[in-house]
Image: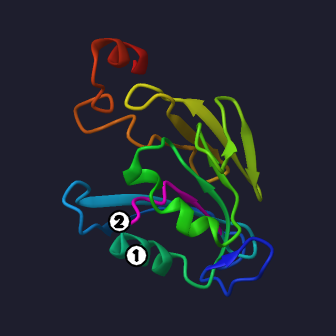
Amino acid sequence: VAPAGSRGRGRMSAGRRILILGEGFSHDPHYGKTMYGIIRYGPDPVVAIIDPGPLDDAHIAALLDAVRGETVSHIFVTHTHRDHVGGVDFLVRLGVPVFAPEMPGTSAIHPGDVIPCGDLVIRACDLSGHAMPSIGYHIEGLSLPVLVTGDALFAGSMGGCQTPRRYQLAL
């Protein structure tokens, strides 16, 4: 993995843009299967990572394998629960900027903020409910727009909100 500004070998043809949801496996039974997002973009393949996941050797190995030889330009965090941010400290050592809601040592991101990633536009959206705050990332410039929600949506639930008030807020 190479920090932004260095040149990775890349595995993509020029100009391709793609969002990949990958999964890692944690040895901690609290996490089970964990997910991360990778956006590849630009003529020289560059990647942005969304929710790098827990500080777990198996998960970090899967994430690093997924971006091996590529330039990592940004890390985006949807919310600060440890199954989403535990691996951030490890990746920060690479010199990659991290954007997160209310997380010490990162660049603060707020609803409405826009971060350009090459020819992609990543817009922060308020998805508070599961976590307070929680940011979604609306990505424009892929073949179709995508909203990465973190844990704001679960199958059959609005992010497993713990109180009726948070559930109403999430709606």
The mark that comes first in sequence, 1 or 2, is 2
Callout 2: helix, strand or loop?
strand
At 35% from the left edge and 65% from the top edge, which residue is drawn? 23
Given residues 30 and 71, the one toward you in this image is 30
Give left or right: position of 79 versus 34: right
Residue identified by numbered label 2? 23
Give left or right: position of 38 versus 155: right
The residue segment tinted magenta is 47-55
Callout 1: helix, strand or loop?
helix
Quarter of the image for residue 167 reads top left
Residue 166 is marked as: none
How does the figure colour the protein chain or chains? rainbow
Q: Name the outermost residue toward the right.
A: 5
Q: Position of residue 130 (x, y in %)?
A: 37, 31
Given residues 86 and 153, the one toward you in this image is 86
Residue identified by numbered label 1? 62
At 32% from the left edge and 33% from the top edge, which residue is drawn? 159
Q: Quadrant of the C terminus?
A: top left
**64 to 53, vertically: above or below:** below
Given residues 36 and 90, the one toward you in this image is 90
Q: Quadrant of the N terminus?
A: bottom right
Tell me the kind of residue under disc 2. Glu
**52 to 84, vertically: above or below:** below
Q: Position of residue 78 (x, y in %)?
A: 51, 43
Give left or right: position of 99 versus 31: right
Neighbours of disc 1 within 10 Å: few (<14), some (14-19), many (20+) = some
Give left or right: position of 122 versus 147: right
- Residue 125 colored in magenta in the image: no
Marks 1 & 2, CB-CB < 8 Å contact: yes
At 43% from the left edge and 52% from the top edge, which residue is drawn? 84
